[in-house]
Amino acid sequence: MATVINMPRLSDTMEEGVVAKWLKNVGDKIEEGDILAEIETDKATMEFESFYEGTLLHIGIPEGGSSPVDVLLAIIGEEGEDISAIINSNNTDTKTEVLEEVKEENTSDSDASDTSVTVPEGVEVITMPRLSDTMTDGTVAAWLKKVGDVVAEGDILAEIETDKATMEFECFYEGTILYIGVQEGETAPVDSLLTIIGPAGTDVSAIVANAGASTDTAAPESKPTETKTEKQEDKTKVKEATAPNTTANNSSGRIFASPLAKKIAADKGINIADIAGSGENGRITKKDVENYTPVAAPIKQVASIEPVAAAPVMTFVATGEEKSEEIKNSQMRKAIAKSLGTSKFSAPDFSLNIEVDMDSAMASRKTINAIPDTKVSFNDMVVKACAMALQKHPQVNTSWTDNNTIYHSHIHVGVAVAVDDGLLVPVVKHTNQMSLTQIGATVRDLAGKARKKKISPAEMQGSTFTVSNLGMFGIENFTSIINQPNSAILSVGAIVEKPVVKNGQIVVGNTMKLTLTCDHRTVDGAVGAQFLQTLKTFIENPVTMLA
């Protein structure tokens, strides 16, 4: 049984991709999670991960070659398996990765036609969209329309929760909602039937029974292989805010607001009734809440450098009683659990600790920030020091594969940022080529986008090293889990004032503890120790980072 992997759609505007580099060769053994290739899109060059195990039997697009989305990229299967029928048929299934069983010759086409149905004229089948490169399924947080509702182009159909954000799903069709395939709170795989729109009264039971699969013989397009997914890409899009609308929100006394807007308002302590809605029929959207500025804040809110992930509000029971409540895991929490679980249980890691004298860094930061319109944080200084240390210790700037260790000639430092639903890691590209002030501005910009859930997948891809800082929360020492495929992650603690020995005298000093967690498959203990020594030198002598 062979797995056909097509050129994936890694961004919402991607029409074709270029294979920048193959990291596996025909005949190589592939494990789930292995990086197969680096694919260049219209926005970034991304690592393409395998979700299957087996042997790489065929490469359909050579290095440097480009092809449209959904064209045969590679085939993975059992060693020695005959895949000539797949290659000859040039299968162009619309799913990014499709599991196909190689059956007797000339039977697959007839089977497919037997199980497909014709879509009536004017009917549009909408499937669960792939809203990020790592998204495998989505949860319908809320339906804003119901079966029987008449929808127009631009209406918001639903709010869909992915592993990275909750987004409003906008319709670019006109018609009546005939069927809803995924109910509120339910989770479904990408490309599964989400909803059907068409003329009122149209019978779509055959499409529903066939789970949305169809052969659109009534369509005027000449391409016989075009399917609902391709057409949907042209007409349906996802965005995070609705078009402006000046209709008053509270004319009937009812508050019209999306569940996401209500949640954000509650987290921020904002009265939702005080916000003017810009959405359809005056509906309050996420954007309205984020842009709202209270006239007077009755409750003083404490600002922090990075927010702590919000926990559900629980009502505790009386003494002696017992009560538990199940809270459904968000897509982001599932993605975090899967990624960190894979890292922790697959990489043999070890940790090294070091304490850094921060007196000179504190003095240098004060001098730098005295310059007008300049702001540098201690975390920016650590990020810069890491980039410079990685240049001197390239073994730490690597990634592990079963057959090779990948040495990255570029340095992209990921910076962990806490958001309401979990943790995101924006990436500062080419960090070693940036000044302290450039790093500071970039980190603030990316962190702001992450907290507002407006960061793009491209801005969170490609890190070669990661920094996680909990010092602003008073944490003096902690150990992070490696952000694979990185080989190491640095945990940064708080700056602590305490007695230290300098020149044989006990004086008051300021120190900070750093913990480096390494993948022992790529980084040995001595290499990690040398990296920390270099890092310590840069941080304790900030002038060396200004050259």
Image (cartoon, rainbow, N blue to C red):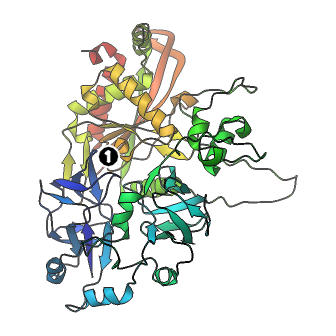
- Between residue 264 and residue 232, name the one nearer to us: 232
Res. 514 image quadrant: top left
Q: Nearer the viewer, residue 226 or 31?
A: 226
Question: Residue 413's spot in the image, x, y percent?
Answer: 33, 36
Residue at disc 1, secondary structure: loop
- Residue 286 in the image: above or below residue 32: above
Q: Residues within 10 Å of mark 1 (few under 14, many from 20)?
A: many
Q: Is residue 255 left or right of residue 17?
A: right
**Does residue 283 appear in this view?**
no
Viewport quadrant of the C terminus: top left
From this view, report whether residue 296 is shown above or below residue 212: above
Q: Amino acid at mark 1?
A: Asn
Relative to residue 153, is residue 264 drawn left or right?
A: right
Point 35% across, 50% down: residue: 484
Q: Is residue 195 above or below residue 246?
A: below
Residue located 22% across and 53% down the image = 38
Q: Position of residue 297 (x, y in %)?
A: 72, 25
Q: Position of residue 259 (x, y in %)?
A: 64, 51
Residue drawn at (54%, 17%) of the image: 498
Q: Position of residue 48 (x, y in %)?
A: 28, 57
Q: Nearer the viewer, residue 437 or 118?
A: 118
Q: Is residue 385 above or below residue 447?
A: above
- Per the image, the residue denoted by label 1 is 486
